[in-house]
Amino acid sequence: MKRCVLLLLASALLLGCLALPVQAADPVRVTNVTVDKTSVNVGDSILVTWEVTGGVPPYESELTWNAIYNIDAGPQHFEGNQGYATMTVRPGMVPVITFFIKCKDEASSWDDYYAGKNGYKSDGIENADGWTAPTDTSIALEQTSVQIGQPIRATVYKAYDVDAGGPMGFYYQWVVTGDDGGEFVTAQQTQWGQYATTLNFTPVHGKSAYLLADAIEYTSADISPTRRHTSDVISITKASGQMEGTATLSRDRAFTGQRISVMLDIRGGTAPYTVTYEWIVYPFDADYDSRPVFHVNETTNELQHSVLLTDAGLGQLDIQVTDSTGQTSSLSGDTTFVVYQPDDFPNEHALTLLTGRWEDSGDNANDRFIMTIGPGGRTQIESSHPAWLWDYDRLTGTASADAGILTLATDLGTRVEYGYEVGINSYNEELLLKLTLPDGLSNYVFYQPDYQYLPFDNMADKATPPPVTEAHKRLLGEWQGRGKYDEYEEYSLELTGDGRIDFAYINAKWPELSTSFQGVVTDVREDTLSYLTDSGYSYYLFFWLTDDGAQMEVVFQDHTGILRRD
């Protein structure tokens, strides 16, 4: 009996123990936080200490200062059950500084950690020198008008904080409007972290300027722009005698092996001028750190300059002019250009390169072949020999160019393919187009009659004609003649001892082909006479003299004539 009672008592005690609640472990949390200051000024240092308790060790913790407009104070990370962080108060921090401490133990997830679960948010620390952010980024200009050579001063205030996202900064660009109305960007720079940035820019030309501030945020992927801010426009005036000017390129597209030139028009300042020309060509696939493939830098007193292009790519010319008093100026004008390799330029540039009017006279003076390519590839082809265009003397359509094939989708619903090659005239660097007609047998070399060169483009001596050579002397005097194959053509040619040329070609059948010019002889060889017209065109004549020098056969733009001394 006693034994049964004892068993019943033991069972009751066991059941009572099983019914008692189990005490769970404390969650991980931040405790014992201390802050050594409750109010601060710029220059003061704040010290924060804390402990991590509960949960399952080991621990990690991180303190982030919130609402800081200066990025220098970032998160501070610790491992273990204790941590501390310090920060020096800097200009640009907000009036009330706070911080947040995240913590993690072995059992908690990273998602909870990054979400700040079980973290600690502080009370505010009063900052007597705190800056109140504007509701939006603002740009304050200190002037509304400046003279050339005087600095523009602007302050950019940034509306962002660390708590709202990642580190942010701004990319600044001063945009100047030139006298011709064109805009160009200069003085680019990037600033990070500062809540207020003061920028200075000194214009050397132009009539107005403004500042672009592009907000950029650094992410794990890249630096990406988020928003653009634009300042008011500030006018630029010129003082009496202020130096200014423009630069004009001889061409904006060229091939390797061609020469490109620039002519300056400088007004004001005190002559003589010193000019630095910097020609740069970058490869077509250039990125931000690509090196130039062509770079020529030369300082001279000449107001015109030229270089022989040897590499293909995207080009630009920078010009700096200094007068005798030390006044400097960068000239306005579009000084960008593109350089191609003959027969090897990118297909996406082909139509741009071929845009314009092209002419070829065919095998004799009775044949004319004209091709005009306009914007968007709109094309018109004319021929004085209808058989080449299949009983049509004019075809219109839309052209496309790819891999050496020029395809014309005609307005009649047909498609015609022409093979083409592009080259350089070795005599005057003129751009030439060789076109193969669909019959595969007829090849025509086209030139651009409206292609204009600046007067100094091909001249070794830009100011005076070259010395009169023996070949030149044989041509001195007046010559008259008629076309060799066509009774409608007449020629007149006169060369003087001082290097002048006076030429006329008259075509009674096709008056639109007639032309005349006066100019300067630039070179005379045994069978070639090169000249530069007073209107700025550079060209040449082929000629052959009889042994007695009394008769000359001349070829001008595929027209041939027999001339005799008058």
Image (tube, grey):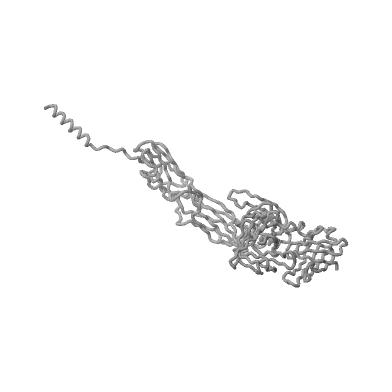
Task: Examine the rendering and report whether any part of residue 269 can be seen.
Answer: no
Q: Quadrant of the N terminus?
A: top left
Q: Residue furthest right?
A: 548
User: Residue 201 lies in what quarter of the image?
Assistant: bottom right
User: Residue 272 lies in what quarter of the image?
Assistant: bottom right
- What is the x, y in percent for residue 80? 40, 36
Q: Residue at coordinates 86% horizontally, 62% vertically from top-left?
A: 549
- What is the x, y in percent for residue 525? 81, 58
Q: Quadrant of the C terminus?
A: bottom right
User: Above or below — where is 277 with respect to 65?
Assistant: below
Taking 71 as reference, is 187 left or right?
Answer: right
Q: 191 or 34: nearer the eye?
A: 191
- What is the x, y in percent for residue 500? 80, 64
User: Residue 414 lies in what quarter of the image?
Assistant: bottom right
Taking 107 as reference, is 363 left or right?
Answer: right
Q: Residue at coordinates 79% horizontally, 68% vertically from top-left?
A: 483
Q: 455 or 99: nearer the eye?
A: 455
Task: Examine the rendering and report whether any part of residue 520 can be seen.
Answer: yes
Q: How many numbered circles are shown? A: 0
Q: Residue at coordinates 41% horizontally, 43% vertically from top-left?
A: 37
Taking 85 as reference, is 208 left or right?
Answer: right
User: Above or below — where is 83 with respect to 537?
Assistant: above
Q: 204 or 348: nearer the eye?
A: 348
Q: 129 or 535: nearer the eye?
A: 535
Q: Residue at coordinates 56% horizontally, 59% vertically from top-left?
A: 210
- What is the x, y in percent for residue 564? 84, 67
User: Above or below — where is 254 with respect to 40?
Assistant: below
